[in-house]
Amino acid sequence: MKRHRNGEIWDFESEMQGGVAPGDDGGGGYGFGEVILGLDGGTTSTVCVCMPLHPSPTTISRSDPPPILSRAVAGCSNHNSVGEMAARETLEQVMADALSKAGSTRSAVRAVCLAVSGVNHQTDQERIVEWLREIFPKNVSLFVENDAVAALASGTMGKLHGCVLIAGTGTIAYGFTEDGRDARAAGAGPILGDWGSGYGIAAQALSAIIREHDGRGPYTALTSSILKALGLSSADELIGWTYSDPSWARIAALVPFVVSCAEGGDQVANNILQDSVQELASSVKAVVRRLGLCGKDGNDEFPLVMVGGVLEANKRWDIGQEVIKCISKDFPGAFPIRPTVEPAVGAALLAWNYSVRHSQKMFAEVQQIR
């Protein structure tokens, strides 16, 4: 494995008694024992957690979450947003930071799961795994998934079964059956239709302001609310503000103003949020139907993990609750879960579970050969 990459970010290892962490017995362990890394990489930020290999995730529950040795945060790691090299630098730096904070080294790592937005095809996974092989020892189990998979695992404590709905700056619905089949809906970005996302809601609000200004749309309280928040004096100035930096997160940050206007009774804002509810619910329904998570009669219970700022409760206009109501009309077995741990922890639990299954498979193959 490489010890010196990207500005010597692994130098801390050589400072730990010649590259061996304190308490290392020479077999890859260290003071706390072996560790696993879980990483949740998104368009806004990237989080990596380092967890002890024990206790086993089978002893972990939502009321008794796993212990965390360290947590590190970095910027965007979506290669579609910042490019391949910048994304890799961010991923490597945040993993090094997490290990350094834990007083550990790569020699103590048992498994790594990178759950990163922008990973949409098997070729994406293979490319990142190949790169990780240059960084970690050969005996480390490496797994790469879309960030939605980690979000699902954060609600089910590492079990890939059910559906997750993420609605933040963007949105995606992702589901798994117990036999490993998967399906997704939305998540194609704002140009291809992340309707219902924070970006989608705010973009509709900005359009509504322009429509009112032009005389093509009705009056809306969104105009005075958003223009005041942005320090603008007229809707004409909104055009320059929008195109000076049309980044997704910058636009999505306007969602709270849409919600407050809807709570105040503005019909245009209410219509925008109602459209959001329908779009988000339709993404989940599409995944559930494709995978048959609801069973033949449509009433089977399945976990529905809800993640993202758009789905968080507000005073009166609770988008997440409205989405659940809409889904439950067709699928009464949907069991909503608000995760008690962050997606990076879900990724770490996936790393553990994947590693165990991989070891069991290898053992079975060896037994057959014998």
Image (cartoon, rainbow, N blue to C red):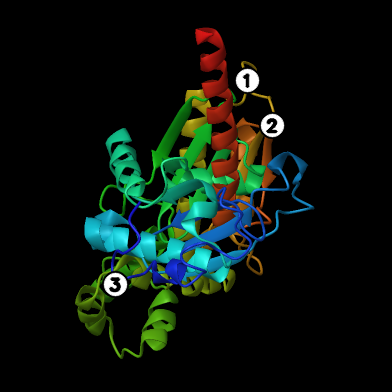
Tag 2: amino acid: Gly
Q: What element does badge 1 sit on?
A: loop
Residue visible at 64% across and 62% down in the picture: 23
Identify the mark nearer the N-term, 2 or 1. Answer: 1
Q: Residue 34, how many percent across, how many down?
A: 61, 51
Q: Which residue is mark 2?
A: 333
Q: Which residue is mark 1?
A: 295
Whether residues under marks 2 and 1 lie with C-beta atoms below 8 angstroms apart, the answer is yes
Front of the two marks 2 and 3: 3
Q: Residue 169, how many percent across, how many down?
A: 42, 61
Tag 1: amino acid: Gly
Res 265 quadrant in image: bottom right
Identify the mark nearer the N-term, 2 or 3. Answer: 3
In terms of depth relative to the viewer, which is nearer, 117 or 24? 24
Residue visible at 55% across and 70% down in the picture: 101
Task: Say how many tags the image has.
Answer: 3
Q: What element does badge 3 sit on?
A: loop
Q: Which residue is mark 3?
A: 7
In terms of depth relative to the viewer, which is nearer, 130 or 146? 130
Q: Residues within 10 Å of mark 3 (few under 14, many from 20)?
A: few
Tag 3: amino acid: Gly
Q: Is residue 178 visible?
A: yes
Image side of residue 124 versus residue 270, left or right: left
In terms of depth relative to the viewer, which is nearer, 124 or 326? 124
Q: Residue 307, how many percent across, how many down?
A: 56, 54
Identify the mark nearer the N-term, 3 or 1. Answer: 3
